[in-house]
Amino acid sequence: MTSFHDFGLAEPITRALAAENYITPTPIQAQTIPLAMSGRDVIGIAQTGTGKTAAFALPILERILAKRVRPERKGCRVLVLSPTRELSGQIADSFRTYGKNIRPLAITLAIGGVPINRQIRDMSHGVEVLVATPGRLLDLVDQRAVRLDKVEVLVLDEADRMLDMGFIHDIKKVVAMLPKERQTLFFSATMPQEITRLADQMLQNPARVAVTPQASTVDRVDQRIIHIDKAAKPALLAEILKTEKIDRVLVFTRTKHGADKVVRGLLKSGFKADAIHGNKSQNYRERSLAAFRDGSVRTLVATDIAARGIDVDGVSHVINYDLPNIPESYVHRIGRTARAGAEGIAISFCDHEEAAYLRDIERLIRQTIPSTDRRTGQRPASQPAAHGKGNGNGNGNGKGNGKGNGRGEGRGNGRNGHNGHGKNQRNNGRRDNNQHRDQRGNRPAQLASTQPIKPQGHAQGHAPVAAHNNAKGEPAGLETVTFMREPRRQAGHRAPR
Ligand code: AMP
């Protein structure tokens, strides 16, 4: 499959894809879409970042278009279950984007952390697509605001993460309420035994598709973290641009304002640089990209949203000037380098306030990123959470006696998925991951891990940041730092844009 037209998708869908600049299906899309369009159950082994959302959303939209029936009151034709608020929101957005030429098309998001009343109202007339986290969905069912007896398609996304987060019992409850005659599309990054068993119970004669996990892109990128005081970030960026052997570098900031500020600083220091983000006109963005592509501007500063459309080979470096607050964005960002089988370098600045983001990222990618500490401030070094996994790679000289105080580790939701909290917990909304957020909206540290997490205690294989490189907290030059690499896995597919 070299084009979306080859699938025989309806014109309103292909038009929406063209508007998004999707030209070539990703491997998971090429494999899944024809199977799902034929009505089969599918087990897809793929991670976020592989294009799996479109892999299930497009055949579902095709089905909705092919059979236009009014959804039942309080019912949904398609139910998508996902473990987190962010992922659920992204999935609903994707359905809206790909389905923007289909009318009417009602898509509702049912997640915790927000008032339930609006969701009850939204569901009252029924919807085509309901995207939900399991806890909130069961709350809605308990309140008789949602009925599930007319679901035609069930999507279970990130099944292994559901297991880690203790949602497996909720999922079984939901599945028991669904019609037996339905299509089930089941996605998981990994297939531990318990997930295989769950799939066996839920799917009928499924086709199995797998793509090299996105992690292989992560593995191909030489990743480094530099702990740095916020105020020292501009100087560090200038230093890296001077000392690293860079062909093309994408610098990421969290905000548009931040991107402009970085560019102003670089211009002042004598570097040629440009910013692309949502406030720039389409013309400006195209000109900037062309200059980046032809090499006349070596440094492009971008926000996450703007970066989606960037497809430039030969990006040797990605610099995360700010760490993203959504861990999946980290994977998307660093995937801009190491494209088409190339290798790349990703350097991320992490200031004191971003330590929690780093923890979430490391849990998502299941790696400890080699780091060095260049903070000069007197503030005590923030310590990374106690990774239950303790993969022991990376930080080299850490003594491993870090206190690893890992905030909020007490929930102890191990592999078996059941965390011992019963219905009450769901009823007060705590089953949704979203509810456990600190003020910056961070996911709790333990939720994305694949291993049981020790409630407090010693950081295994994960020394305190301060010990990584210079125990005295003196600034260390880049050149003095030895970054250790992760063992490589087989190179995978080209990362989707
Ligand atoms: P996902 O794995 O579904 O989260 O997708 C990762 C990213 O790839 C999202 O930003 C999508 O918009 C983008 N994407 C998905 N499929 C394609 C495609 N065929 N071509 C270009 N970009 C895509």
Image (spheres, grey):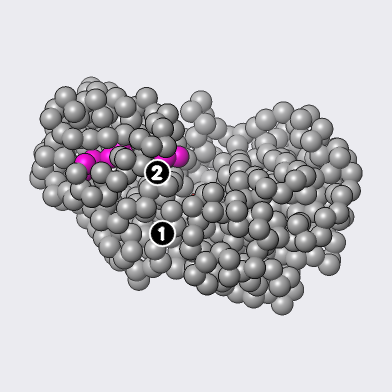
Q: Is residue 274 above or below residue 294?
A: above
Q: Which mark is residue 307?
A: 2
Q: Position of residue 416 (x, y in %)?
A: 61, 58
Q: Earlier in the sequence, mark 2 or mark 1?
A: 2
Q: In the image, 474: left or right of 143?
A: left
Confirm whether residue 436 shows in the render. yes
Q: CA distance from mark 2 to mark 1?
A: 13 Å
| Residue behind label 1 places its C-beta within 8 angstroms of ligand 1 | yes
Residue 401 magenta-highlighted: no
Identify the element where label 2 is drawn. Answer: helix
- Identify which residue is drawn at 53% across, 46% down: 447
Crowd rating for badge 1 (residues with CA inside 10 Å; few <14, some 14–19, many 20+): many
Q: Is residue 172 above or below residue 284?
A: below
Q: Position of residue 112 (x, y in %)?
A: 67, 36
- Foreground residue among 189 and 244: 244
Give the amino acid at mark 2.
Ala
Q: Quadrant of residue 263?
A: top left
In the image, farthest residue toward the front = 283
- Identify which residue is drawn at 64% across, 75% down: 207
| Residue behind label 2 places its C-beta within 8 angstroms of ligand 1 | no
Q: Which mark is residue 495?
A: 1
Q: In the image, 278: left or right of 465?
A: right
Q: Is residue 451 above or below residue 353?
A: below
Q: Which residues are magenta?
A: 297-306
Q: Which mark is residue 30?
A: none
- Foreground residue among 40 and 453: 40
- Identify which residue is drawn at 65% across, 68% down: 8
Q: Position of residue 293 (x, y in %)?
A: 27, 50
